Amino acid sequence: MRLKPESRLRLSTVTGSFDAYGHMLTLETFGYSFDVTVYFAAHEAFTRNVLGRRGWLDQVRLGLVEYESKLYLSRYNK
């Protein structure tokens, strides 16, 4: 994992806001690699995980069949 420091950012969710720092890194999921910016909460006491729509999720096609316990994943451009 390579980290490149980015600027501080204030993120908002339905339950409130928090400060985070972004880092460029390569995320690997099921054999696919993605260059993304990932934001980490500025305070260690922050107890929630937040998944955004930009960066990783907009680069994949994701299918979930809950009743069969199956997850389908491919690059968006395939």
Image (cartoon, rainbow, N blue to C red):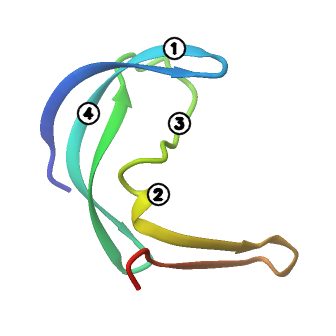
Q: Give the spatial CA distance, label 2 vs label 3.
A: 12 Å
Q: What label does residue 72 carry, if any?
A: none
Q: Quadrant of residue 14?
A: top right
Q: Residue furthest right?
A: 67
Of callouts 2 and 3, the N-terminal one: 3
Q: Residue at point 53% right, 36% down? A: 50
Of callouts 4 and 2, the N-terminal one: 4
Which of these two is toward me, 33 or 62? 62
Q: Give the spatial CA distance, label 4 vs label 2.
A: 16 Å
* Quadrant position of the C terminus in the picture: bottom left
Of callouts 2 and 1, the N-terminal one: 1
* Quadrant position of the N terminus in the picture: bottom left
Q: What label does residue 22 carry, if any?
A: 4
Of callouts 1 and 3, the N-terminal one: 1
Of callouts 3 and 4, the N-terminal one: 4
Contact between marks 4 and 2 (CB within 8 A): the answer is no
Q: Residue furthest front?
A: 77
Q: What label does residue 57 carry, if any?
A: 2
Which structural element holds mark 4?
Answer: strand
Q: Is residue 22 above or below residue 71?
A: above
Type of amino acid under label 2: Leu
Closer mark to the observer between disc 2 and disc 3:
2
Q: Residue at point 34% right, 35% down? A: 39
Which structural element holds mark 3?
Answer: loop
Q: Residue at point 46% right, 15% down? A: 18
Residue pointed to by mark 3 = 50
Residue pointed to by mark 1 = 17
Type of amino acid under label 3: Val
Which structural element holds mark 2?
Answer: helix
Contact between marks 1 and 3 (CB within 8 A): the answer is no
Q: Judge left or right: residue 45 versus residue 9.
A: right
